[in-house]
Image: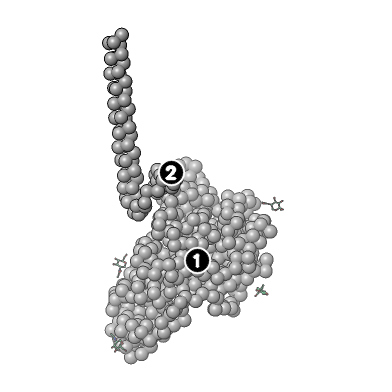
């Protein structure tokens, strides 16, 4: 009996000791967990906040989530208002794989509503490409050579073959491309009908969001707006597709909902038309909506080919076009380097902080694409440069072996010309360009607005 009591006592003290140890262990574990929590906060660049019993449960629940790599990161926070914008990208199966990933990881990286439309449904990495042409009627497709490439791509896809291996399909891809615009408007409205703005672009278009969003704030999405850089088709006008077509929510609704057969009713007329952006313009005109000229806010050039001059030096710029994957990356890192990255980008800033340092004194195998007077009968590039020196308005020259062109209205970098058999050579007078820049008034705040009208004379 005594023995039993003793064993019992020993057992009891053992249990108490065990409980003590367990308690201490739990305390140590809790402490470790708390430290870990705070270290993790540091790891992700967050500030350690005071331990607060009230918010702890909520905070640790959030912290336990693994980081979502697809979530927009902190640098995307500046894009306030972007959630109101749908961007559609028009591409083709033969170009998509080398254009879409760069575009999506540069200027569209932070865009929350992007739909990509192609002439074949496919996935490229994480990106889904819709077939813009799948609802076009048999009557339009059958016996129509514009759809030969479409059918060929379908066959390759069905056989599990690589569509990107298709070469020399540029013309065929172009013929197919013009059927897409009207369907993209309808399909994007069906996918996302409740947004204020729809910006329709190509896979080589670059959007400067810090300019786009403050501009959209000044516009009223309940008006029937159809805006872009005006391009002429005979006496007709349309917004140029490559530099971006901006439609307000009201215009989208009219086009894709109030008249929900618009695209189908235009399909039979596409074959005899040159271009999809023109057809979209004609369809909108038929509903009483005319294009508003957004040039130079929407621009059809790259940083190297846009002419810098008096008429838009202080204007903000929203889009660039014909951007190669390399130029997209270059432009994107330029945007990341900007000190006032949330302010609209003006042409003057683009020149001074990106383009200026690329301009040499002279370069062979290069066309600086001057705008101005052409002088024939000039024997050499040296003589062409001399003609420029003697003309106080001249910023740059381009000599192709026969003709000398002086750039007097504007200046730009231009393009490589080595494949046409001519002996191209270009020169710039950087002193004059700097003097011209110094003589401009400071630009001040960005002013948007539509101030250039354009009539097409046919
Ligand atoms: C178009 O609208 C009409 C009338 O609201 C509706 O009956 C029809 O189903 C719609 N068509 C499509 C393709 O949505
Ligand atoms: C649109 O343009 C056409 C042709 O220039 C013109 O007749 C028409 O009045 C314009 N419509 C509006 C709403 O401005
Ligand atoms: C550039 O322009 C300046 C100012 O007009 C002139 O003095 C200079 O000679 C020019 N330079 C060249 C290389 O032509
Ligand atoms: C122009 O392009 C050719 C061919 O791609 C290249 O070899 C040459 O270096 C380029 N010239 C310049 C000045 O960039």
Task: Give percent across and percent down for residue 114.
Answer: 50, 56
Residue 340 picture quarter: bottom left
Q: How many residues crowd around disc 1 within 10 Å: few (fewer than 14), some, or many (20 or more)?
A: many
Residue 16 picture quarter: top left
The answer to whether residue 106 is above or below residue 126 is below
The N terminus - image quarter: top left
The answer to whether residue 171 is above or below residue 350 is above
Q: Nearer the viewer, mark 1 or mark 2?
A: 2
Secondary structure beneath label 2: helix
In the image, taking residue 11 as reference, residue 203 lies left or right, namely: right
| Residue occupying the point 63% across, 63% down | 250
| Residue occupying the point 54% across, 60% down | 84
Q: Which residue is mark 1?
A: 213
Residue toward you, 194 or 157: 194
Secondary structure beneath label 1: helix
Note whether residue 197 is visible: yes
């Amino acid at each position: 009996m005594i023995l039993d009591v003793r064993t019992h006592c020993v057992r009891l003290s053992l249990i108490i000791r065990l409980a003590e140890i367990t308690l201490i262990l739990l305390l140590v574990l809790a402490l470790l967990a708390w430290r870990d929590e705070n270290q993790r906060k540091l790891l992700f660049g967050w500030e350690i906040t005071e331990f607060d019993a009230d918010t702890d449960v909520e905070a640790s629940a959030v912290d336990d989530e693994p980081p979502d790599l697809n979530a927009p990161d902190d640098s995307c926070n500046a894009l306030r208002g972007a959630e109101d914008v749908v961007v559609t990208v028009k591409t083709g199966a033969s170009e998509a794989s080398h254009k879409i990933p760069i575009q999506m990881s540069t200027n569209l990286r932070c865009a929350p509503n992007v739909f990509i439309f192609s002439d074949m449904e496919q996935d490229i990495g994480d990106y889904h490409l819709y077939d813009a042409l799948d609802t076009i009627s048999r009557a339009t497709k059958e016996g129509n050579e514009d759809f030969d490439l479409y059918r060929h791509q379908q066959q390759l896809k069905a056989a599990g073959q690589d569509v990107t291996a298709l070469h020399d399909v540029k013309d065929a891809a172009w013929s197919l491309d013009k059927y897409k615009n009207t369907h993209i408007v309808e399909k994007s409205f069906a996918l996302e009908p409740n947004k204020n703005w729809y910006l329709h672009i190509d896979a080589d278009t670059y959007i400067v969001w810090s300019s786009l969003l403050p501009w959209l704030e000044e516009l009223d999405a309940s008006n029937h707006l159809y805006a872009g850089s005006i391009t002429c088709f005979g006496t007709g006008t349309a917004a140029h597709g490559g530099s971006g077509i901006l439609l307000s929510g009201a215009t989208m609704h009219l086009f894709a909902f109030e008249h929900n057969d618009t695209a189908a009713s235009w399909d039979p007329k596409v074959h005899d038309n040159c271009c999809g952006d023109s057809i979209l313009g004609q369809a909108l005109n038929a509903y009483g909506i005319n294009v508003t000229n957004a040039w130079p806010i929407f621009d059809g050039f790259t940083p190297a080919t846009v002419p810098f001059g008096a008429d838009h030096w202080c204007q903000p710029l929203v889009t660039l076009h014909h951007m190669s994957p390399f130029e997209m990356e270059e432009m994107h890192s330029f945007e990341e380097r900007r000190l006032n990255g949330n302010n609209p980008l003006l042409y003057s800033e683009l020149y001074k902080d990106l383009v200026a340092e690329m301009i040499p004194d002279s370069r062979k195998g290069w066309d600086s694409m001057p705008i101005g007077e052409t002088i024939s009968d000039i024997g050499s590039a040296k003589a062409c440069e001399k003609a420029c020196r003697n003309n106080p308005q001249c910023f740059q020259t381009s000599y192709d072996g026969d003709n000398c062109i002086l750039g007097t209205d504007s200046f730009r970098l231009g393009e490589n010309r080595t494949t046409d058999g001519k002996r191209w050579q270009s020169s710039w007078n950087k002193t004059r360009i700097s003097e011209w820049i110094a003589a401009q008034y400071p630009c001040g705040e960005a002013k948007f607005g539509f101030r250039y009208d354009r009539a097409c004379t046919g």
